[in-house]
Amino acid sequence: MLFSETVGRHVVSAAEARTVGIVDGFVVDPAKASVVALRLKKTDGSGDTLVWDHIHAIGPDAVIVRSGATLGTPSGDLAPLADKHRSLPGKRVLDERGEALGTVSDVDFDPDSGALLTVRTTTGDSPGDRVLGLGSYALILRQV
């Protein structure tokens, strides 16, 4: 599933059958090469972050959360990863030597595990397991 296909989907609580927000972005842990949380907008609470473990399923029309799933603000290990400057689409891509590899156009991820499958760039696709780091300036990929 692509990031671009998921942004804008409603996040619905299975227990209460109500919308708790709309997907606005992704929190990626480069050490795990995985999505670890979703950033939401138009939430009904004070938080805007949904931890991956609270997601029951990502379907073609909505993201379904488990009963009792709560939104929060990024804290602990999640706080530095959730910086808005770490959004992947539009991010410059460099290899570990610092050579430019274009910019991120989209990311394909596994909707069950959150694993990054493919990073789509303006110069071609790279396997998600090549992700080394992500900062405010660029996404860093291992050399092939």
Image: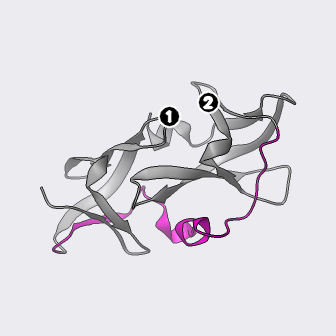
Give residue 79's position: percent from left, percent from top.
Answer: 61, 70
Give residue 77's position: percent from left, percent from top.
Answer: 58, 68
Total labels: the figure holds 2
Residue at horizontal 77 percent and vertical 43 percent from the top:
69
Give residue 6's position: percent from left, percent from top.
Answer: 54, 38
Q: What residue is disc 2 on? A: 57
Which segment did they paint magenta?
A: 68-97
121 horizontally vs 34: left or right = left
Whether label 2 touches label 1, CB < 8 Å: yes
Q: Looking at the image, which residue sits at the far left?
A: 144
Residue at horizontal 19 percent and vertical 52 percent from the top:
123
Q: What residue is disc 1 on? A: 111
| For marks 2 and 1 on the same chain, the one whose residue lies earlier in the sequence | 2
**Occupied quadrant, residue 137:** bottom left
How far separated are the C-alphas under marks 2 and 1?
A: 7 Å
Q: Main secondary structure of the magenta part?
A: loop
Residue 109, visible in the rendered structure: yes
